[in-house]
């Protein structure tokens, strides 16, 4: 039976994943068996079917051959791969939108989901000092669209550990950081997010090599995302995710309590506001 192309007005990645599940089950294969043919884990196939991972063209070709789907996945994986985010972050951002819980450690910057417009603009301008205002505007618009995840009163559960350096890096615009910290404090006080600050006094700690994001889902295995300068890697291997989960647990154990963290965040914001008025 011939398959029609996906409706581009729908969610291409979710629909492609649903089609993959139907085709796999029709072929009588488990996720692990299909993964073995593709040299990936069964959990990776589960992420494809749940729409939390991107299907690349080379996988689409192999899937069409293995499941005898007449080129359906090759024809449609392009639409499912389109993203308004950089390639190294696209899969993580789209998985984030489907996550039930997000736990994140931020060593240098306020996490994207918590940034204000002014703070995001400063960050993008620092990364791309020669970019046009139109380009920066587009980046900020896409960034704020991500933050709209928090408009839902309960999902996802967001738990962040902020290194104290995040609070102290004000530069020439202390008023922007003050506003950003007040925004975080409001989200904490409204009980929408959980935040802990990892103080300088914690010394050497488990997260010194970089940022970390952990995501769990209703219908797919958990993911871990590690990001560097212009790079990022998404992990679904259970042993790797478990190791990164331990790292996050160690960070929360060394961080201030949520109550003390809120007090520090508001105190630093007040200091910046006082400096501004002075």
Image (spheres, rainbow, N blue to C red):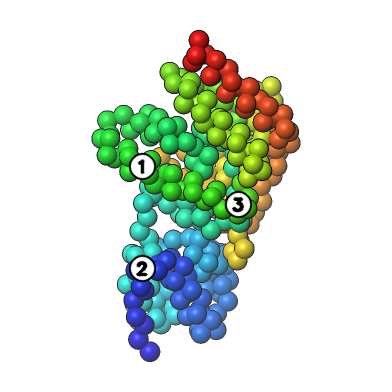
Residue 141 visible in this rendered orientation of the protein: yes
* Mark 2 / mark 3, whichever is N-terminal: 2
Disc 2 vs disc 3: Cβ atoms closer than 8 Å? no
- Which residue bears the numbered disc 2? 9
Name the mark on residue 139.
1
Residue in the picture at 50% in, 80% down: 22
Where on the picture, by quarter, is residue 125? Answer: top left
* Mark 1 / mark 2, whichever is N-terminal: 2
Helix, strand or loop under label 1: helix
Q: Quadrant of the N terminus?
A: bottom left
Mark-to-mark CA distance, 1 and 3:
25 Å
So how many labels did they put on this image? 3
Q: Nearer the viewer, residue 208 or 51?
A: 51
Q: Residues within 10 Å of mark 2 (few under 14, many from 20)?
A: few
Disc 1 vs disc 2: Cβ atoms closer than 8 Å? no
Q: Residues within 10 Å of mark 3 (few under 14, many from 20)?
A: few
Foreground disc of the pair 2, 3: 3
Q: Residues within 10 Å of mark 1 (few under 14, many from 20)?
A: some
Mark-to-mark CA distance, 2 and 3:
27 Å
Q: Is residue 226 above or below residue 204?
A: below
Where on the picture, by quarter, is residue 100? Answer: bottom right
Name the mark on residue 153.
3
Mark-to-mark CA distance, 1 and 2:
23 Å
Residue 246: image location, x then y, percent: 69, 44
Residue in the picture at 38% in, 40% down: 140
Helix, strand or loop under label 2: loop
Q: Is residue 191 left or right of residue 57?
A: right
Q: Is residue 275 above or below residue 115?
A: above
Residue 251 visible in this rendered orientation of the protein: no
Foreground disc of the pair 1, 3: 3
């Amino acid at each position: 039976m011939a398959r029609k192309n996906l409706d581009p007005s729908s969610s291409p990645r979710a629909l492609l994943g649903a089609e993959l599940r139907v085709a796999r089950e029709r072929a009588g294969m488990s996720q692990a068996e299909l993964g073995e043919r593709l040299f990936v884990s069964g959990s990776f196939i589960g992420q494809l079917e749940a729409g939390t991972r991107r299907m690349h063209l080379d996988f689409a070709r192999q899937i069409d051959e293995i499941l005898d789907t007449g080129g359906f996945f090759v024809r449609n994986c392009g639409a499912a791969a389109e993203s308004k985010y950089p390639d190294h972050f696209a899969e993580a951002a789209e998985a984030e939108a489907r996550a039930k819980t997000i736990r994140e450690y931020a060593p240098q910057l306020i996490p994207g989901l918590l940034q204000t417009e002014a703070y995001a603009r400063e960050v993008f301008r620092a990364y791309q000092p020669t970019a046009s205002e139109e380009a920066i505007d587009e980046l900020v618009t896409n960034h704020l669209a991500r933050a709209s995840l928090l408009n839902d009163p309960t999902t996802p559960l967001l738990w962040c550990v902020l290194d104290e350096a995040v609070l102290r890096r004000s530069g020439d615009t202390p008023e922007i950081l003050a506003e950003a910290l007040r925004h975080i404090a409001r989200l904490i006080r409204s009980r929408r997010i959980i935040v802990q600050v990892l103080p300088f006094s914690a010394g050497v700690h488990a997260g010194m090599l970089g940022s970390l994001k952990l995501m769990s889902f209703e219908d797919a295995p958990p993911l871990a995302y590690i990001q560097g300068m212009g790079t990022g890697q998404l992990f679904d291997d259970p042993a790797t995710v478990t190791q990164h989960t331990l790292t996050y647990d160690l960070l929360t154990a060394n961080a201030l309590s949520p109550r003390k963290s809120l007090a520090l965040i508001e105190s630093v914001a007040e200091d910046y506001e006082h400096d501004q008025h002075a």
